[in-house]
Amino acid sequence: MAALRVILTILFIIVCIAIIVLVLLQEGKSAGLGALSGAAESYWGKNKARTMQGMLVKLTKIFGVLFMVLAIVLNLNVF
């Protein structure tokens, strides 16, 4: 059981580093001056889920859930 705890701890550290990198790669949420002229309603604004930024947001959510699950499992003290 100690080997499983070590593997889960290493996986937890990798997930933590991945979350840090994903958050740092994301752009800010502020619209800036583009929102004043209506540029936020362009094709790219509507289809943001298909862009690189949308993929980063989706990956951040997935790794966030994985982080929470691993934190709970590692805190159970079953191992």
Image (cartoon, rainbow, N blue to C red):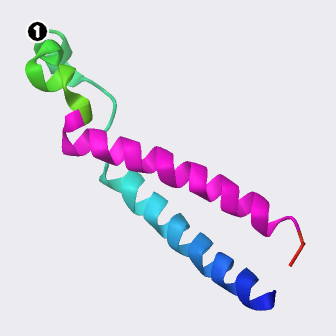
Question: Mark 1 belongs to which amino acid?
Answer: Ser
Give me the residue at 17% from left, 17% from top.
40
Q: Is residue 69 left or right of residue 26?
A: right
Taking 63 as reference, is 42 above or below it? above
Tell me, yes or no, whether the highlighted magenta stretch contains residue 53. Answer: yes
Q: Is residue 77 above or below residue 38?
A: below
The part of the image, by quadrant, that contains residue 48 is top left
Q: Who is closer to the viewer here, 36 or 20? A: 20
User: Quick one: 66 or 25, which is closer to the camera?
Assistant: 66
Quarter holding residue 10: bottom right
The residue stretch that appears in magenta: 50-76
The residue under the point 52% across, 66% down is: 15
Q: Which residue is mark 1?
A: 37
Look at the magenta stretch and give its main secondary structure.
Answer: helix
Would you place residue 40 above or below residue 16 in this image? above
Decide if residue 23 is on the left or right side of residue 51.
right
Please provide percent x and percent y for residue 76: 87, 65
Q: Quadrant of the N terminus?
A: bottom right
Q: Quadrant of residue 44?
A: top left
Check the image and report above or below for 22 versus 10: above
Q: Residues within 10 Å of mark 1 (few under 14, many from 20)?
A: few
The residue shown at (66%, 76%) is 8
Residue 14 point in image, percent of width and height: 51, 73
Residue placed furthest toward the bottom = 3
26 displayed left or right of 60: left
* Position in image of residue 37 (x %, y %): 10, 9
* Res. 27 visible in picture: no
Task: Tell me if residue 72 can be seen.
Answer: yes
**Image check: 39 left or right of 54?**
left
Residue at left 10%, top 17%?
Answer: 42
- Residue 62: say if magenta: yes
